[in-house]
Image (cartoon, coloured by chain):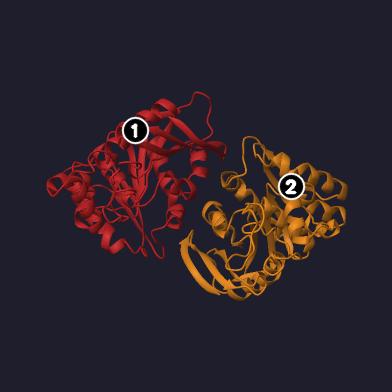
Chain colours: A orange, B red
Amino acid sequence: METVGTNRAFGGVQGVYRHASTATGTDMTFSVYVPPHAEGAQLPVVWYLSGLTCTHANVTEKGEYRRLCAELGLIFVAPDTSPRGEGVADDPDGAYDFGLGAGFYVDATQAPFASHYRMWTYVTQELPALIAANFPADMDRQSIMGHSMGGHGALTIGLTLADRFRAVSAFAPIVAPSQVPWGQKALGGYLGDDRAAWRKHDAVALIEDGAHVPALLVDQGASDTFLEPQLKPELLRAACDAAGIPLELRLHDGYDHSYYFISTFMNDHLRWHAAWLKG
Amino acid sequence: METVGTNRAFGGVQGVYRHASTATGTDMTFSVYVPPHAEGAQLPVVWYLSGLTCTHANVTEKGEYRRLCAELGLIFVAPDTSPRGEGVADDPDGAYDFGLGAGFYVDATQAPFASHYRMWTYVTQELPALIAANFPADMDRQSIMGHSMGGHGALTIGLTLADRFRAVSAFAPIVAPSQVPWGQKALGGYLGDDRAAWRKHDAVALIEDGAHVPALLVDQGASDTFLEPQLKPELLRAACDAAGIPLELRLHDGYDHSYYFISTFMNDHLRWHAAWLKG
């Protein structure tokens, strides 16, 4: 693991790191904020999965999470959203919603994506091991959140690995990729046409199939242009109600899909995660 | 004035605007955050002047000022750092410390810069009038802060227009441009070789020449690579001590020159400004 750069912030250290990933077969870059802490302390870890077109940098620069992570004693980890570099296939038309910046947190099975697009394994296995080995992380206290495509990632990973993640939340998530254009394109492209394989990567389907978590928190901007065509939180509402999962779903007038929305509600999510992580 | 874009944030509106400036003879872009407020209310205005290479966007995206501006009821205005566009002269070598992105908040007198580089007039006259006309601003309650070159701007403008600005603060400011390479290049290039003309644009010289404010707040990172060669806060310390200006100068171990430093201490500055603005 190579340190790309570190900056002191809010008494802790915001770092950016790079390593050669065996999961993706590429170099991968990620950011970690370590708050001020007593020597030898091990701190809970909040994972943040980013949305389409993003790298680690978007939330690192615009997420406004450091002040409260410092106050609450939370490590904050932000991975990239896809493999990148020489030999990594992209959308044939260079579209923003597939390929580079759009890994959708799955292990692709379809050529030419299967060789590098293994973001599920990267985010759930390889990067956690790297975090455990290199940071003062208490891996028995982890939680996960994300935005848009990363909200999809947080929900599907959190539902699948419910024993690992004590809290799961999302900003404007894609809750049912099987039922919306972004998700159909991505799951079809990465996993093929057999929709049975998609259900493990669709939060609503996972819940219908029996996945369970103690609670979910979802914030959604009412002026988000992706709300109706791509996000459809009402499908998560219905699935959670049917499954008896308490979902706090908050619709915010006037808010859009941007980091201005995310940063506004970041503190609410961090406090919610901290309560579950410490409870 | 044209609205480039607005985003709801922390209950208020973060906007970016553009207008044809008569001061600079170019289009100028700036950002304004208006916090939630009662209809008809007029709110105090905090000016933020940015540093070398920046536009309005750096602090708008990375400054982490909106949460507290919303809580304290402060309008936050961030101008650009130079004129830009067709026909605007730049540093002959394209250097980052002169020309585009480096207006130094002066009205240039030297060709070819005098025709557009009129940032003093722009920031102190034209843009305030535009803010007064288009936002719920109480122009009797203004304060000013800035970073690096913008800290120089905040100090020199705040000291010169002490009746207008109730509070003046800075992050890692250039306090004595006449005595450091960045400032000597800029003041020489924009104002010519007569150093008497520089004193009005040098905070330390202004204080030596009798300018006075009730108090100053300056934060500085101890690991800032520009500290020794360009910033020299000890010169401001000496000038303030000699003039009887209370200067709270805080040196922070491990902090650099970046927005990670600025965002860490932004809340302290906003609270300090709010106290003076409401006092």
Q: Is residue B250 visible?
A: yes
State whether residue B47 is above or below residue B40.
Answer: below
Left or right of B55 in this view: B213: left
Which of the numbered marks, if any, corresponds to residue A181?
Answer: 2
x then y, percent, for residue A20: 59, 74
Classify the position of the N terminus of chain B by image quarter: top left
- Under circle 1, the secondary element is loop
x then y, percent, for residue B75: 45, 36
Amino acid tagged 1: Ser
Left or right of A33 in this view: A194: right
Tell me the chain of label 1.
Answer: B
Q: Residue at x 47, y 66 (%)?
A: A6
Classify the position of the C terminus of chain B by image quarter: top left
Residue of label 1: B21
Amino acid tagged 2: Pro
x then y, percent, for residue B28: 38, 37
As drawn, the residue found furthest toward the top would be B40
